[in-house]
Image: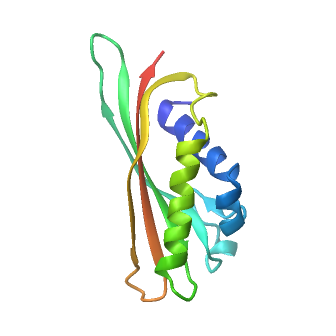
Amino acid sequence: MGPTRALQAAIYEALLSSPAVTEIVGDRIFDAVPQSARNRFPRITFGPSDGLDAETDCVPADDLFFQIDCWTRADGRLGPCRDLAEAVRDALHQVPIYAALPFAITSGRVARVRVFEDPDGETGHGVVSFEATVERL
């Protein structure tokens, strides 16, 4: 497994291990939302991910970027969505997600948290941007 998939799996485990996250979404954390869960909120999905070559001094490395989407449909859409996005942010700050990876993480952080109303007018949408630099061993 390459560094992008391994880091996404570690992020997924960190989210499932967070009582604050699971109190809000239960186990509704998806890479692709199954048909059976399309109308179930709140939930978290993995959005786009990116990678850039970050090799320096002959050390193979990648800068990895993940978008983690938070979705709510509750009264006060943006308030509950903010709570979920902040729980995701905290889970990624508090849990040592790098311990089980076969890569050296030289940096990892939540770079941005955005919350806004989705164009459907019914859904709160939060975007948590996570970035990391990994050295391939």
Q: Report the residue at 66% width, 59% height from top.
A: 20
Nearer to me, 43 or 30? 43
Taking 61 as reference, is 38 left or right?
A: right
- From the top left corner, tell me how far across and down residue 70 is, in percent: 51, 66
Taking 74 as reference, is 104 left or right?
A: left
Taking 6 as reference, is 37 left or right?
A: right
Taking 94 as reference, is 66 left or right?
A: left
Q: Is residue 130 above or below residue 44?
A: above
Specify the color scheme: rainbow
- From the top left corner, tell me how far across and down residue 88 is, in percent: 55, 56
- From the top left corner, tell me how far across and down residue 43 is, in percent: 60, 68
- From the top left corner, tell me how far across and down residue 130 is, in percent: 43, 47
Residue 28 falls in image quadrant: bottom right
Q: Is residue 1 above or below residue 34?
A: above
Q: Report the residue at 58% width, 43% height from top.
A: 94
Q: On the rendered image, what quadrant is the N terminus found in?
A: top right
Q: Is residue 10 above or below residue 48?
A: above
Residue 113 falls in image quadrant: bottom left
Nearer to me, 49 or 105? 105
In the displayed image of the protein, which residue is found farthest to the top? Answer: 58
Q: Report the residue at 51% width, 23% height from top.
A: 103
